[in-house]
Image (cartoon, rainbow, N blue to C red):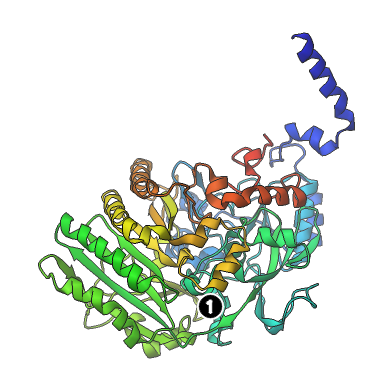
Amino acid sequence: MNRRAFLKAIGSAALLPILPRRLSASTNFRRRRPSDAAWPSEAAWKRLNDAVGGNLIPVKFPISEFKTDPAGAAAKDLWDNLTNPYYIRDQPGLTQTLGWVGAWATKPSVYAVAARNAHDIAEAVNFGRENNLRLVVKGGGHSYQGTSDAPDSLLIWTRHMNDIAMHTAFVPQGCEHTVQPQPAVTLGAGTIWIDAYEAVTTKGGRYVQGGGCTTVGVAGLIQSGGFGSFSKHYGTAAGSLLEAEVVTADGQIRVANACTNPDLFWALKGGGGGTYGVVSKLTLRTHDLPEYFGIVNFTVKAASDDAYRRLIREFVSFYHENLFNDHWGEQAHFKPDNSLDINMLSHGLDTERANKVWQPFLDWVAGSPHEYSTEARPSIVSLPAQGMWDLQSWKEHWPEFVFPNPNGNPLIGLLDRALSYLPWQPAFRRDKRPDAPPNDLWWVGDAGQVGWFIWGFESLWLPASMLENAGQERLADALFASSRYSGVELHFNKGLAGAPPDAVAAARDTATNPAVLTAFALAIVADAQGPAYPGIPGHEPSVAKGRKAAERVDRCMSQLRALVPNPGSYVSESNFFENGWQHSYWGSNYPRLAEIKRKYDPDGLFLVHNGVGSEQWSADGFTKL
């Protein structure tokens, strides 16, 4: 060692005694596992159980039934329910996504605090911090990237925190002299969106911006930014957040809003779930409800590659001229078999007006019968908006979408893409367990995500500049080139270009990547298998097929990525192996988020894959790097 290096070394060593203990010890910090001698004793766990009112539970792993007794009743019951998101929601040891090839597979925590209130959460947070445990938070358990589960951990399970309270004139705490009262709804952290829509829309006659998938957890969606079918009109879910109650790493129960802890409030609006604290409840602005919501479903098949190129170009032009506004959301799918699937929703249009919008495009298709065909008569219909999430209203207005049509007419169900090979499709599936509430529903189009094992998944925000005349042909050509490798979906409701100014302004005041503000859509390419789980004979995910699928997904998205100079991706729907995820997920907002993380969680108690601050930890979250 030379003299300069030696003096530098002893000088650094001399500073160690006066540094804060946390900083000097952090380089060797490792969280405890059950195999460690310092793992909490039975007496310690009993004290935690007493502190949370007896709501500490050992976590079972239902999938183990496939190994211990594969022919038994429990295994059969599990297999019957592994595609039921409500069943999965009720199991602390299961997540809706079962894993990702080459990345992760769902594993249970050791114990779970089945929290009933913020006090229970605070006790769990204090216990986890004081005993150096890996903490995990789960509400809906939808995370594609496995952020709501981890082996050898303590789970904070918010499933039972589902109280809902409506407000006619809500004012956030501390904002009494600066914010006008407004209609709002307060939702417990364990609430899922079907419960929120039933309370706010079906019963309350108003709208709350949430997720399109009915079984997604409210808290996780808000913290990730959050898009629903009508985000093109109302903006992101995070943009409607007025106040949150959150337990931070020091065990304090805090209120976060625009006037109290405003930095934490901003971070909770899209900065990523499970990162800054554990949310116990949220209050969201509610909105006026339009008279109608509607659906548009049809498929156009091209007879040749050249015809398909022309079809894509025509649709891109048609979208720009007629659909690029806040009346239209959801999806268009460009598929390798030269077909274009339209599965879109409308806001505020009756059936007659919606049909008039689409008629020019349908006339263009019909004008070339040798080049284009439709598999069925297009479905373009509307129903009273208050009945959008009400089974009885669907039975009254759209009975053909609720029950199979006995005449076999080729109707396609709402947002159905997973099972479109059938001659008809109902819109909903329902939890058929004996004690299930009648309105525990999920869209058929979301059914493929229940119990799936992901092979590949990527997303990309597409800037609205692509829709200008000079860019339309390049976009159309890239969509065609993408479709040669895999199907690509454009989710128009997940880009806010074309939204009203107030919706864009609210989203700008969130932590979500600013790329969303000028994007007309989020492109998604994905492939998966399910239900599947490693180690279960006959039901294992195919690693070889998964790797090939992941390669196709990457090559598909690369055609679009080449058009976007600074690509951005939506944190909740993105690649587990996302390159440069800090910029991809949050863009210019990342440095500010990192500062807030250091303020409220300086020791990294809360950790999720590719979450703010996670670059300082090992992949499993147990060792400080």
- What amino acid is at disc 1? Asp
The N terminus sits in image quarter? top right
Q: Is residue 197 left or right of residue 174?
A: left
Q: Is residue 280 left or right of residue 41?
A: left
Identified at 79% across, 63% down, the residue is: 253
Judge whether 409 appears above or below 32 on screen: below
Identified at 82% across, 23% down, the residue is: 12
Judge whether 190 appears above or below 577 on screen: below
The x and y percentages for residue 51 are 81, 61
Report the residue marked by disc 1.
435
The x and y percentages for residue 129 are 77, 48
- Residue 313, visible in the rendered structure: yes
Identified at 74% across, 35% down, the residue is: 29
The residue most toward the right is 18
**444 and 19: which is toward the camera:** 19
The residue most toward the bottom is 396
**277 and 442: which is toward the camera:** 277
Q: Is residue 210 left or right of residue 159?
A: left
SS class, disc 1: loop
The C terminus sits in image quarter? top right
**144 and 362: which is toward the camera:** 362
- Residue 237, visible in the rendered structure: no
The residue most toward the left is 370
Mark 1 surroundings: few (<14), some (14-19) or many (≥20) residues within 10 A:
few
Judge whether 610 appears above or below 400 on screen: above
**68 and 273: which is toward the camera:** 273
The x and y percentages for residue 333 are 32, 62
Q: Is residue 172 left or right of residue 452?
A: right
Identified at 34% across, 82% down, the residue is: 354
